[in-house]
Amino acid sequence: MGRLAAASLVGTAIEFFDFFVYGTAAALVLGPLFFPTFSPVAGTLAAFGTFAIGFLSRPLGSVVFGHVGDRYGRRPVLFASLLLTGCATVAVGCVPTYESIGVAAPILLLVLRFLQGLGLGGEWGGAVLLTAEHAPAGRRALWASFPQIGPAVGFLLANGVMLALTAGLGDADFRSWGWRVPFWAAGLLAAAGLALRSSLAETPQFEALAAEGKQASAPLREVARGHWRLVLLTAGALAVGYAVFYTVSTWALAYGTERLGVPSTVMLTCVMAAVAIKGALTPVFALLGDRYGRRTLCLAGCAASALWMFPMIALLHTARPLLMFLGFLGSLLGFITMFAVVAAYLPELYEPRVRCTGAAVGYNLAGVLGGALTPIVATAVSDGGDGPPWGVAAYLTGVALVSLACFALLPETLPARAEEVAERECAPA
């Protein structure tokens, strides 16, 4: 389990490094370089628009790779998704700016961002099922939480590199070539991840299905017919997590530097410190999920998020590093209370034959609802006025209340129940 968990963590860290480095670049530099004819706010909105494309393609990636995972195994998904995301990310670092090739520059950016999201949409399902389907029932949330640490590690790597570059280079050099370095580094990281995953074994539950010839021939059709309500509820329930995380990690970065005049190095340091603590506490909340239930933790985290959004915006608007950090940390603790257990929760909600598709589609649809729209909406409602952007807080609170209602409609899953479903599905006819 340790080797499997490490391989899943490293793989998701690499893929989310690729995904997050784009978000940081969108907040700091892509607007002026690829949309120079726009006003500063409009350029940021346009850059966040290309950022959102990655979320829109993630559900499609979950469908494509979910079919592979449910039909041919979880293991092939881990290789194909990592290869696609890595290649697309390296290519982003090679795209000429608007000044060099005109409108073709943002178009290429959109296409490559789409491919990034396509790969990441498959990564989560494969990595989570690799650990969840190998893990003992009583510790499934703990072991399945390791892929959930990967996003924190990827975020810290992406922003650590950006922080070093912005601190070590002059503004002219950073805008000229420095911002491209993290994208080029993604190629080396992807190669290392592929090497690490080369020795992984297929999961026992899929092998049992394959031995009996019980794989789903059309997983998406089965999910759409028999589990559509579950997919919509999980997407709505998880939307608040994406909304909170990308408010902190993407929108707040742009707002702090552009509107509050806080140096980008200070903003990055505040966000990174909060993300580091969030990542370290992920296994702790997962253990609580193994003891008290997945739904219980999700309801608690969702309620905490609804209560914290206005204080978080107030703390951000002070522009004081310690207070901003506390605001970010409170938000991410509510987030991880939910997302530490969803890697066990979602697979337990679906039968093994459609688990890769069902869990991944629900998870990535939540990304569209919460992650794709939030930086755009937050930037739009915070434009104008000198006071705190309360509209952002109201929007996030509303998303949290919708997610709370969705969680309330989902069932609790117990390890014993999940095992019974798996055994019944894999038993000979």
Image (tube, rainbow, N blue to C red):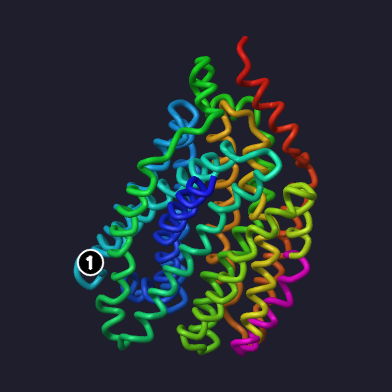
Classify the position of the C terminus by image quarter: top right
Q: In the current view of this chain or complex, which residue is farthest to the top?
A: 429
Instruction: Estimate the x, y position of residue 22 in percent, counting from the top left.
Output: 40, 64
Relative horizontal placement of residue 84, taking residue 377 as reference (left or right): left
Residue at left 68%, top 83%? 315
Residue at left 49%, top 64%? 153
Residue at left 76%, top 65%? 304
Classify the position of the N terminus by image quarter: top right
The part of the chain drawn in magenta is 305-322
Instruction: Estimate the x, y position of residue 137 in percent, counting from the top left.
Output: 68, 38
Relative horizontal placement of residue 349, taking residue 360 as reference (left or right): right
Question: Is 413 situated above or below 244?
Answer: above
Amino acid identity at mark 1: Pro
- Quarter location, residue 286: bottom right
Relative horizontal placement of residue 309, taking residue 324 as reference (left or right): right
Relative horizontal placement of residue 160, taking residue 247 as reference (left or right): left
Question: Of residues 98 and 311, which is closer to you in this image?
Answer: 311
Instruction: Estimate the x, y position of residue 308 in percent, counting from the top left.
Output: 74, 71
Predominant SS along the magenta part: helix
Question: Is 118 situated above or below 389?
Answer: above
